[in-house]
Amino acid sequence: YRDFQAKDAFFVTRIKDNTKYEVIEAMPVEKYTGVISDEKIRLTGVKSKKDYPCDLRLVTYEDFTDGTVFSPTSSVSKP
C-alpha cells in the first residue's frame, strides 16, 4: 500500500466484516445516489494498522439492482 501512496495512486477494494477501524471524519452524503456513508477511517487491528498506518476513505453504498450493500475503501481525497 505504501508503494501506491508514494506514487500518488489509489486502490479500491472490499472491506472484511471483521475489520477493526475508527471513524476519523464523516462527510455529508446525498442518500438518493445510493451512497449510505462516506467516512475517513483509520485501521485499528494490530496487524492492519501496522501494514497500513495511513488513513483511508470508506464509502458504503447500496447497489439498487439487487439491494446489496458494498463497502469499498479508497483514497482519502474526494474524486
Image (tube, helix red, strand yellow):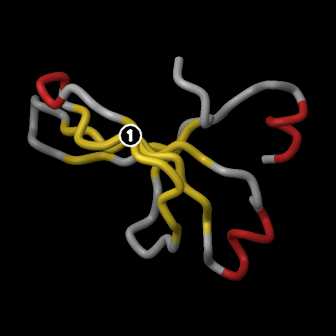
Residue at image point 60% right, 47% down: 56
- Percent position of residue 77, x then y: 60, 28
In this rendering, would 50 be left or right of 22? right
Q: Amino acid at mark 1?
A: Asp
In the image: residue 6, left or right of residue 40: right
Q: Residue furthest bottom?
A: 46
Q: Residue beneath label 1, please?
A: 38
**Figure quadrant of residue 52:** bottom right
Label 1 neighbourhood size at 10 Å, few (<14), some (14-19), many (20+)?
A: many
Query: Which of 7 and 43 lies nearest the eye of the viewer?
Result: 43
- Image coordinates of residue 79 in percent, x first then y, are 53, 17
Residue drawn at (32%, 33%) of the image: 28
For residue 67, which quarter of the picture?
top left
Q: Position of residue 3 (x, y in %)?
A: 88, 40
Residue lying at 23% horizontally and 41% vertically, measured from the top left:
36
> Secondary structure beneath disc 1?
strand
Residue at (53% x, 43% y) in the render: 57
Q: Is residue 31 above or below residue 52?
A: above
Residue 74, position as x, y percentages in the image: 56, 37
38 left or right of 51 in image: left
Q: Nearer the viewer, residue 41 or 6?
A: 41
- Looking at the image, which is closer to me, 28 or 8? 28
Q: Nearer the viewer, residue 57 or 23?
A: 23
